Amino acid sequence: MHAARRLLYLAFLLLLLLLAGCSSSAMRFESEGGSYDIDTVTSAAPDDATILGKPVSEAAGLRHDALVALRSDSEDGAVLADLLTEQFPDNDRSVPFYAESASFNGAAAWVVFEVWGSQGGTLEHTRVWVFDRESERVLLTAAAD
């Protein structure tokens, strides 16, 4: 009985470690974001991207995890995750880490920040994408680092 209790305790610790490891790649989504223009949107990125510095070879898995987290966040998050999947279906060198439903030049928009890197390198550059919520057109893409 004592050995079974130890085994159960070890299994529980392993589960906690696995869950902690998964949360580091999760995407943050704000349903009520800010109001931006071309001069302010690039500086809106939070500086807590936990995936910075990870190998680009891990980007596809991290991207998948981020999109799953976004889909499970809310209905708006699911719509945005579908848009990102449709717009960039084979993008395996970048990972979104923050998004918000915001206003851009007075129009309803999605603001998405991602990190990316060169093949064989690390995820070290930050880029912002702004999508019109109605038409789903790209309104802006720019370096944010």
Image (spheres, grey):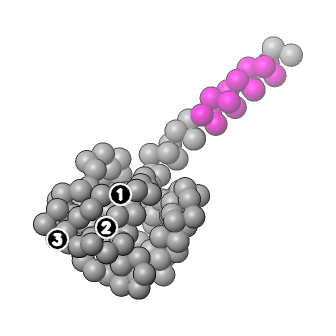
On screen, residue 137 above or below 114:
below
Q: Would residue 15 be found to the left or right of residue 129 on screen?
A: right
Q: Residues within 10 Å of mark 1 (few under 14, many from 20)?
A: some
Q: What segment carries the magenta color?
A: 3-16
Q: Residues within 10 Å of mark 2 (few under 14, many from 20)?
A: many
- Asked whether the residues under the numbered discs 1 and 3 touch, taking CB atoms below 8 Å apart as contact, a structural biologist would say no
**Looking at the image, which residue sits at the far front?**
106
- Asked whether the residues under the numbered discs 2 and 3 touch, taking CB atoms below 8 Å apart as contact, a structural biologist would say no
Task: Tell me which numbered mark, 2 or 3, is placed earlier along the sequence.
Answer: 3
Task: Look at the numbered disc 1 and give the secondary structure of its residue.
Answer: loop
State the CA–CA distance, disc 2 to disc 3: 11 Å
Q: Identify the residue shown where x is 31% and y is 67%.
A: 103
Residue topped by disc 1:
33
Residue topped by disc 2:
103
Q: Would residue 80 be found to the left or right of residue 97 on screen?
A: right
Q: Is residue 11 inside the magenta stretch?
A: yes
Residue topped by disc 3:
38
Q: Residues within 10 Å of mark 3 (few under 14, many from 20)?
A: some
Q: Identify the residue shown where x is 41% and y is 72%.
A: 92
Type of amino acid at the residue the image marks with label 1: Gly
Q: Position of residue 29 (x, y in %)?
A: 43, 56
Asked whether residue 79 appears in the rendered view, the answer is: yes
On screen, residue 9 above or below 74:
above
On screen, residue 91 above or below 16:
below
Q: Position of residue 74 (x, y in %)?
A: 56, 59
Q: Point out the image quarter for the C terminus.
A: bottom left
Q: Position of residue 105 (x, y in %)?
A: 23, 73
Image-quadrant location for residue 101: bottom left
Q: Point out the image quarter for the N terminus.
A: top right
Task: Tell me which numbered mark, 1 or 3, is placed earlier along the sequence.
Answer: 1
- Nearest the viewer among 11 and 70 is 70
